[in-house]
Every structure is written in structure tokens, then in C-alpha cells.
Image (tube, rainbow, N blue to C red):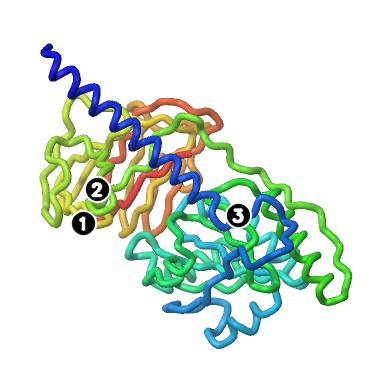
Amino acid sequence: MKTEIKTAIACVIIITIGIITISIYYNNIDLASNTTSTIEIYNKSQLNKAPKLFGGTEYINIEKNELEDIIEGKVVLYDIWTYSCINCIRTLPYIVDWDEKYSDKGLVIIGIHTPEFEFEKNKDNVLYAVEKFDINYPVILDNEKDIWNAFENRYWPRKYIADHDGYIRYDHIGEGSYKETEQIIQKLLVERSESLGTTSSSLKLTELNEFEHSTFRTPELYFGYKFASGRSQIGNENGFNPEMIVNYKIPEETRQNYFYLDGKWKNAKDSMNLISENGVISLKYNAKQVNIVASNNSELEIFVDGNSIPKYMTGSDLTTESKIFVSEPRLYNIINSDDTEPHELIIKINGSGFEIFTFTFG
């Protein structure tokens, strides 16, 4: 190989490493923004105040004109979520419990439902989720991402906690840190009580079985060409063809962590829609939990390594016949086991119209 070529390759590698390093550095800065290193604050002028909740398109468990009154002088937990996001779903039991424990002690929880997919903008769909997850606190539908942008947010889920003066004292991205988050709630409630000249007692911290993620698992896979841009994991040589109907065929050899389609599928911005009477999705994955976000009435027959799913791997939405019946648009749990394992998943779809948005893993 010529010296010039070797030099060029070396330069490309160095530049790539540099870009990744810088990206990680600034991402870590972003993760730490608005998060104080200590709860003891003597000068709040350095902190950001929670933005006004302008731009909500619909309201659940509250009227729009009641928002400012219930927030005034309270400790407020703002939970940015969306109902088909598995990471959001796993945090909800904690948030619901905190609402029950602290709502009469000065805590107000506001769910800011910012959709990832179009079907999540439908109020009836969100209402179904609110009832399913026993959410009694106010939920604002942020369909235009106005509140999301006001918080300068980029993640699902994200929790911000503001003190009784409205200053953001803590934020957390993703799952986990439940003990730390609840301790912040308790400390800020004590601060509020002291400012009012009253007393406040801490309750026992919530103890639930926190989901333990696989260390090395297949990343989330998107079926919409808009979401998959820059991270395409479709294995068919046809690839994505925006707004086109494509006749896909699964090749004999398939790659790990890539999904493959068989049948005629419409390529949409946020999904793939089955046009033919039957279709197949194939995927070699590594995880202990597999979910899909899907919609439209369909019957799915599921196979793992060529066989029906064994009992120890059966997901919560799977029937005893290794089938899933898709009805309302939401997340469906296919695989749920205790151990992270590599497998080949085959989904056979009976009937046209099935729509799939994403695979998620745990």
C-alpha cells in the first residue's frame, strides 16, 4: 500500500476518534446540565427556573386554567414521557407511587406526554395508557413539542424536579436512580415546610423490583425511514425506499442485530406497513427482553430458533400458542426471560395492514 494511502487512512481514523471523543464529552456535559452537585443551595441565581407550560394541545386529569394554581408554591416533578416507550413505562410505577405518597405533602407531578410517533398524539390512546398505568396526576399532551423545547430536552424519559420557588434543582435522564430521586423529593419538601414554618417527616423510600438491563444487548431498531436515518438496521438489500411499496425477500444469510422483511411493505416515515396478505420479520438479537411497538388489528405467530417460544421466555402479551393479537397501537412484550441470550426471532404476520414502528430490548 502506498505511503500516501496509509497516511490518509490514519488521518481518517484519528479524525473519527476525535469526533467520537468530542461527542461523548459534550453529551456528558448535556447530561449534567441543570443538575446540582449538592441539594444545599445558597444562591439560586445560578439555577434555571422551570419554564412555563405553554403549548399543551390536550389535558388529562386537569383543566388548562388550573395548572398555574396547583404548581404555585409546590415542589414539582416534571416527567417527560411517551406511552409506547419501554424506558418510560418502567419508570411509571415509581412516579405513581410518589404521587400517592407525597401529593398531600406538597409535591405535584406533571406528566408531559411528548409523542415519538404520530399515533401517540391521539388523546384517546393516551387516555388508555393513563388508565392502564393508574396515573392520577395531571398529564399534558405536548404534541407540538413546545414544552419539550422549552426544557431544551432531547431524551425519553426525563425527570426534572423544581423546588417551591420554581428553580430546577435536579434532573435525571432515562431509567434508574429512583432512590436518589426520591431523596431529592423528600429534601425539597422539607425545604418547603421550613419556608412555611411547618414540619415535615420523611417516609420510607419506595422499594420496587427495578429492571436490570442486559449489558450487551441489541440496540433499538426503527422501521420508519425518518427515524432510521443514520442508523439503518434493515438487512434487506432493497433497504429503505421512502413512501414506496417494496417487495422484500429474506436472504439465506442474515446478520446479527439487523431485521429482515418478507412480503410487500409500505415504507412510511415512522413505520413499515404490511400491504401483502402475509409477511415475515426475521431478527437475530441478543437480549433478555424483546418488545415491539405496533398497531392495526393483526395476528402474529412468534418463533424462536425455529420453535414456539418456551415458557421461560414468554412475554406478557404472548398467548399460550405463541401468538400476539395486536389491537390498539402500543408496546407489546414478546420475550421476557431472566438471562441475556442470543436467538433468532421470527414473526409471521397473518393478514394485511399490520404496522410496526420499532423493536426495543432489555
Q: Within 10 angstroms of label 2, few (less than 14), some, or many (20 or more) residues?
A: few
Residue 305 appears left or right of 281:
right
Label 2 sits on residue:
229
The part of the image, by quadrant, that contains residue 197 is bottom right
- Residue 26 x, y percent position in the rendering: 44, 45
| In the rendered image, the vertical position of residue 256 relative to residue 115, given as above or below | above
From the viewer's perspective, tell me whether residue 265 is left or right of residue 329: left
Q: Please tell me whether residue 144 is drawn above or below residue 97 in the rendered image.
A: below
**Three-letter amino acid code at disc 1?**
Ala
Q: Quadrant of residue 187?
A: bottom right
Quote the CA–CA distance across marks 3 and 2: 31 Å
Q: Amino acid at mark 3?
A: Thr
Examine the rendering and report whether any part of residue 317 can be seen.
yes
Q: Secondary structure at mark 1?
A: loop
Q: Nearer the viewer, residue 306 or 196?
A: 196
Question: Dividing the image into 4 quarters, which one contains the N terminus?
Answer: top left
Report the residue marked by disc 3: 35
Task: Kindly indicate the quadrant of the structure image that contains residue 135.
Answer: bottom right
Mark 1 or 2: in front is 2
Q: Determine whether label 3 and label 1 are within 8 Å by CB.
A: no
Q: Amino acid at mark 2?
A: Ser
User: Which residue shows up at 31% across the image and 54% down it?
Assistant: 298
